[in-house]
Amino acid sequence: MTNLLLAIIYLAFVSLGLPDSLLGSAWPSMYPELGVPVSFAGGVSMIIAFGTVVSSLQSDRLTRRFGTGRVTAFSVATTAVALLGFSLSRSYVELCLWAVPYGLGAGSVDASLNNYVALHYESRHMSWLHCMWGVGAAAGPYVMGWALTGGLGWPAGYRAIGVLQVALAATLMLTLPLWRGRDGSAAEAEAGEAPEGASGDREEDRPLSLREVVRIPGAKEVMVAFFCYSAIEQTCGLWTSSFLALGRGVPAETAAGFASLFYVGITVGRALSGFLTMRFRDAQMIRMGQAVILAGAACLLLPLGERVALAGVVLVGLGCAPVYPSIIHSTPEHFGARRSQAMIGVQMAAAYVGTCLMPPVFGLLANHVGVWLLPVWLLAILGVMVAMHERLVRVRR
């Protein structure tokens, strides 16, 4: 039964990744039909990101009350309804309205499942779990491409993914008995933990407020580390192609192809990281990832030719691979099982804020200074992330 439940969790993360890349792949076809400027995709993306932040911060309260299984099933169902709503939308306003439940559903399932796997499974499964997200994110544009090239239009692409999400939600509902005895508070009771709060008192089995979470030693450090990680990943994903073409003179077609290899590097790297975690601890995996990001950013910074710059893109992707899942998996070890859901919730929220905020900020810098600044930007953010992670390790030790 444990293996069956793990398979369901993997499937849930494939499903979580499927819609994440749909908006970008469909938007060139969507915005003329909706009658809005091409830049309006950012509005939909920001609404989704805001919803994920809100639901991530509520994940501790929801999981303690309803359990991971129910929260996951309901969140996937909410996302499915939102995707079907996207397929029926005929105006930009409708799209924005459906983006609200989409973001709320995605944030809840992300935080709840990450905490569940961190509590119950070994580090390798966390890496492979996020590898499954990459598989879903890579498959989404293919589904949308099938709909567009087949003359069915972008609504059919959203409808197809929405139907898949409905099927997964139904599967999760039917398999709710598998979660019994291994859910949230039950796991904590089995662990017999009652970690001390910021005041030194034993915590009650209740949801923690954001203020209480932030006061926990090490909380600020891990939130900043997550913010920095997402800033690196999302800025690279959005601006690498422009950097290669405008900053290094790489042909546009080649630059676009290698920019996509950044995400391939993350997905393949997480598959490999699962095996490396059998030998190395989470902190060691994070440091190795940071070292590889450093090497990749150096390749982008130094004027060593086109091939070195292209290799740098792949290296940054490979370096990003172990960092995110390893920080999440180490959360119960750093903060205790009782506080892990609350901590992972605020970590997810910090990551989404970094995702939403930092790529546009770099865009402003690129516009006023130059896109050549990308590796300097990456190195600066990496320095903050390394400092925060090392401080976290010291504080929680």
Image (spheres, rainbow, N blue to C red):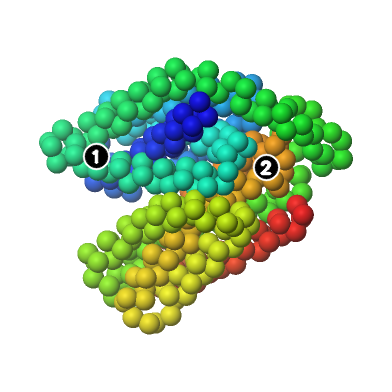
Residue drawn at the location 35% of the way across and 23% of the way down: 167
Mark 2, Cα crowd under 10 Å, few <14 / some 14-19 / many 20+, is some
The residue nearer to you, when weighing 193 against 260, is 193
Q: Looking at the image, which residue sits at the far left?
A: 151
Relative placement, left or right, of 119 versus 124 is right
| Label drawn at residue 332 | 2
Q: Position of residue 225 (x, y in %)?
A: 61, 55
Q: Position of residue 247 (x, y in %)?
A: 35, 74
Q: Position of residue 38 (x, y in %)?
A: 29, 47
Q: Amino acid at mark 2?
A: Pro
Mark 1 or 2, closer to the camera: 2
| Label drawn at residue 144 | 1
Relative vertical location of residue 315 with respect to residue 83 in this rendering, above or below: below
Relative vertical location of residue 396 with respect to residue 80 in this rendering, above or below: below
Residue drawn at the location 43% of the way across and 75% of the way down: 299
Write down the quadrant of residue 34 in the picture: top left
Relative vertical location of residue 304 with respect to residue 372 in this rendering, above or below: below
